[in-house]
Image: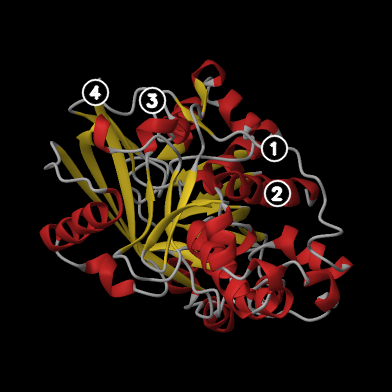
Amino acid sequence: MRVAVIGGGVAGLAAAHELLRGGAEPVVFEAAGRPGGKVGSRNEQGYLTEDGPNFLAQPLDGLVDAAGLRAEVVDAQGPATRWVHYQGRVLKAPSLRLLLRAGAPRALLEPLFARPLREDTSLRAFLVQRLGERAGTLVAALLAAGVYAGDSGRLSARDAFPTLGATGERGSLLIHRPRAKRRTLWNLRRGLGSLPIGVAERLGPRVRLNAAVTELRPSQGGWTVQGEAFEAVVLALPAAPAAKLSRPFAPQFADALAEFHAAPVTLVHLGLPGAEVPRGFGMLDGDGALHALGTLFTSSMLPGRAPEGKALVTAICGGALHPERASLPDQELISFVRADLLSTLGVRSEPDYVRVVRILAAIPQYATGHRDRVRAARLLLANLPRVELAGASYDGVSVPDVARSGAAAAARLLAER
């Protein structure tokens, strides 16, 4: 079975790897000059920076082994201390001062307000009902910003945070909360970008770079892609380009994909004196007072990210609440980030390294009703030749979730042979 995999990000590469293992013949079409999509790395001037995520919290053994990178896995080290900027103060999370400011006494009464989550609701509404106005609003804002750069008033409690939603369906978050095994954050010695490169190298000429797909159409029980015949397709693109590509032959499906949205994010990487940056994981903005919704102290957690005596700091700007900030000119954005670091941490030094990474549609936003929209979109493909959707727009935004989405799409095609 010859399968066109459209999109050479993590979902597409995982699909191609699974198809090849299952005896199919995948061909990956990637528009960019490198594989990986939003997952990429750059090493310059002694600083190792990421184009997208900096840490993974779930294992990805299959692809890591496929890329031959098992020995390259690096676990995060050092104190994983987190801070929250809230009401003009930088507070360690968790700490008594933060808990008191956030309305912990009301939050402790949560079991009395625990009603099963029978219908999908927004993350903020769900947590405010459970924890009270102050605590619920703060916790929702931190969860939304930390995972989705999102708006807690729009994100689905059930679909954006399935573990939280499942706990809420059973009852109290405090009493019935399952004891999850602590997950170790990890990366790769040469950056996460080495993962898609490694997988693509193993796939060899099956991966075509600089190969944007402009022709996709059903043809004689299969598909024509760029003039070539295929028996099946994995559409491993974000929702917006997938909608554009499919509109000529599936307008209702394209309209369904138009309901999926993603938030823009710009990363500002700064190289600073190590003595001025605290050791820990990073800081989140709890009430929208800063220009960056989150700041990572990357080199504090991962070795080899900055030269000796220096620190790599990564500010995350934009997101669903302030998308305009993601498009500010470089110098203006850098100035705002530096002002944040001065007001919160007292960092005064000029950076000796700066890199700005812009991602127009960075993180899909799983608004209320997300799983229903995904189900409806996939049903609209039922009358077409064999085709599967995969990627962050549908089945989870983390890199491991995206890889599983691609592998699952491949497995469904293999099962239909």
| Quadrant of the snapshot with the N terminus | top right
Measure the alpha-carbon separation of dots 1 and 3. Answer: 25 Å
SS for dot 3: loop
Q: Which numbered disc flags the more N-terminal residue, 3 or 4? A: 3
Q: Are marks 3 and 4 in contact (CB under 8 Å)?
A: no
Residue at image point 48% right, 63% down: 145
Which label lies toward us, 4 or 1? Answer: 4
Q: From where the camera sits, is residue 405 visible?
A: yes
Tell me, for residue 190, which label it has, or none. 3
Query: Label 3 is placed on what type of residue?
Result: Arg
Cα separation, mark 4 vs mark 1, equals: 30 Å
- The first of marks 4 and 1 along the sequence is 1
- Return the residue at label 1: 182
Residue 191 screen position, x and y as percent? 40, 31
The residue located at (57%, 80%) in the rendering is: 256
- Which residue corresponds to mark 2? 408
Distance CA(mark 2)–CA(mark 4): 44 Å
User: Dot 4: what SS?
Assistant: loop
- Mark nearer the N terminus (1 vs 3): 1
Question: Of label 2 and label 3, which has the lower sequence position?
Answer: 3
Q: Which mark is residue 309?
A: 4
